[in-house]
């Protein structure tokens, strides 16, 4: 869980600083500084996002999103045709099956031509 620590400073102590007016607005009576302490899990995720493995996976993401968009827009997965999880599972499975069959048929027609 992330924790936020908020520190309050008296602006009078900042008046001799060369950054006066940059850190806080002139005329305010107090200044706050917020420090977020990230959990280990959050820090591990940030470290993973900066790794080469994450960059490699993110390059492939468009392919997955492209297929999801095709299933949703061309094959009707935008809206469920039945109620319940079982009905949606059957609809999803049959839609993916039809999409794959059409792809196989297109590949066969290419090789035959």
Image (spheres, rainbow, N blue to C red):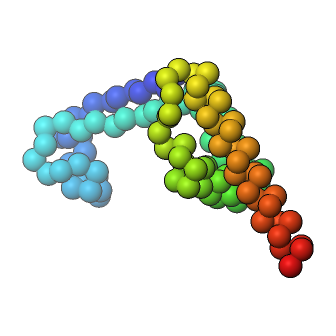
Classify residue 16 as left or right of residue 88.
Answer: left
Q: Residue furthest right?
A: 112
Residue 69 horizontal/vertical position (percent): 56, 53
Q: Is residue 72 above or below residue 86?
A: below
Residue 21 horizontal/vertical position (percent): 21, 55
Classify residue 20 as left or right of residue 77.
Answer: left
Name which residue lies at 24% across and 54% down.
20
Classify residue 55 as left or right of residue 78.
Answer: right
Q: Residue furthest bottom?
A: 113
Of residues 5 and 90, the one drawn nearer to the viewer in this rendering: 90
Of residues 7 and 62, the one drawn nearer to the viewer in this rendering: 62
Of residues 12 and 64, the one drawn nearer to the viewer in this rendering: 64
Where is the C terminus found, in terms of image quarters?
bottom right
- Residue 49 can be seen in this image: yes
Residue 55 horizontal/vertical position (percent): 71, 56
- Residue 47 can be seen in this image: no
Name which residue lies at 50% across and 34% down.
80
Name which residue lies at 81% across and 58% down.
104
Residue 94 horizontal/vertical position (percent): 68, 38
Name which residue lies at 66% across and 47% down.
49
């Amino acid at each position: 869980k992330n924790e936020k620590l908020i520190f309050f400073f008296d602006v009078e102590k900042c008046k001799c600083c060369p950054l006066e007016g940059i850190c806080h607005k002139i005329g305010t009576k107090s200044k706050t500084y917020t420090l977020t302490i990230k959990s280990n899990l959050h820090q591990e995720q940030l470290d993973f996002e900066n790794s080469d493995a994450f960059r490699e996976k993110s390059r492939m993401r468009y392919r997955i999103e492209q297929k999801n968009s095709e299933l949703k827009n061309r094959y009707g997965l935008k809206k469920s045709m039945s109620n319940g999880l079982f009905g949606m599972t059957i609809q999803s499975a049959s839609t993916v099956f039809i999409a794959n069959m059409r792809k196989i048929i297109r590949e066969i027609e290419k090789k035959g031509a």
